[in-house]
Amino acid sequence: MDKIKMTTPIVEMDGDEMTRILWKMIKDHLLLPYIDLKTEYYDLGLEYRDETDDQVTVDSANATKKYKVAVKCATITPNAARVKEYNLKEMWKSPNGTIRAILDGTVFRAPIVVKGIEPCVKNWKKPITIARHAYGDVYKGSEMKIPGAGKVELVYTAEDGSETRELVHNFAGAGIVQGMHNINNSIESFARSCFNYALDTKQDLWFATKDTISKKYDHTFKDIFQDIFDAEYTAKFEEAGITYFYTLIDDAVARVMKSEGGYIWACKNYDGDVMSDMVSSAFGSLAMMTSVLVSPDGDYEYEAAHGTVQRHYYKHLKGEETSTNSVATIFAWTGALRKRGELDGNNDLMDFADKLEKATIDTIESGEMTKDLALITTIPNPTVLNSEDFIKAIAARL
């Protein structure tokens, strides 16, 4: 059989621990036998990030801007214990955060829906994609403990030295205070990424804030989204047969619980952090959650939504058998291959991505799965496979 040809490479970002082991298995059993795979390879394993002073992460992000499509393996964001374990020069930043900042991207997370892995919310029939604005708010907030009576103000000092003040609170005793910020450019990039991704996936887009209470901060998000939609996307959405819908965040939560799914739900940073975990858990498993970073310039970086599966990796190092779910990592590859095929007009590559996803889902629905899914499936008497045998079972169907 002739292998499927590629004209433009995908940026390949290798990772850490058990997901790095799965990465090689996926390539060996599911990709290389069928595709003349062209990638520009970057080793984002923690050791090499340390060796290059994290320059490799920056290089991989810049390569994504050049080639437009990347696929990323899960990586370690080191804490103090990891610095000691790996004898690192310093506690390097999150690779995802670095890449996201360089691409100015928005993260879209969606569950992989499989018969036999039923959502807790019984009326959810289609995936709900969470779009999280990963900038500012609580995550870049400034906080202060107030020891006693006194006045707290917000103070803006303009470049000409003039000041604008806003009273936060007159404290009669001890308390706490927090200051948050955002910037219009980031909100605009977030909005365009959401509108573009909705068009790309032909899904309705919801957006929600609490603008009735936060009449300047949240209302600015609402206004920017509406202004950009009215000026740039109204006709495109009508042509695609999809809608943009704004509501309050509490109304959105109530509507989501009663909906069938099948749309993108855009959230501010904190809301997206919370709601993506709620959606992934309610659909069954974080190991069945896809993640794609989309920039307003049309750059795409696909990955699994989960971490490096450290516990399984330590078992693997001891020579013990593991049953690690590789589905989200497989779908990271299929997402990247499909997008590469779409941008290059390569129908064979797009068709292959579809078939690999179908083979993966068919394997689970036939009762062959990893241990984590066997524990929650409604399929009677499932066959529990180890990490490599599950990938081989998919290969047999492929």
Image (cartoon, rainbow, N blue to C red):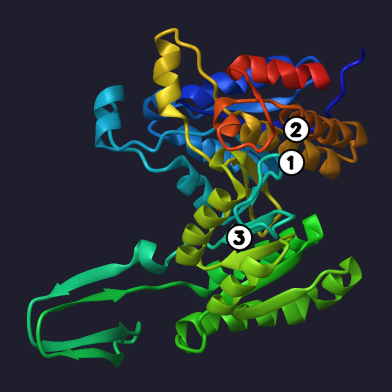
- In the rendered image, which residue does mark 1 sit on? 115
Q: Is residue 150 visible?
A: yes
- In the rendered image, which residue does mark 3 sit on? 131
Q: Is residue 30 visible?
A: no
- Between 185 and 204, the one nearer to me in the picture: 204
- Residue 37 on image: x %, y %: 76, 22
Asked if disc 1 and disc 2 are in contact, CB closer than 8 Å, the reply is yes
Establish if 318 lies above or below 327. above
Residue beneath the point at 64% across and 41% down: 302
Q: Secondary structure at mark 3?
A: strand
Q: Residue furthest left?
A: 148
- Residue 350 on image: x %, y %: 85, 37
- The mark that comes first in sequence, 3 or 2, is 3
- Residue 241 on image: x %, y %: 88, 69
- Any mark on residue 61, and which? none
- Between 298 and 176, the one nearer to me in the picture: 176
- In the rendered image, which residue does mark 2 sit on? 365
Establish if 20 lies above or below 316. below
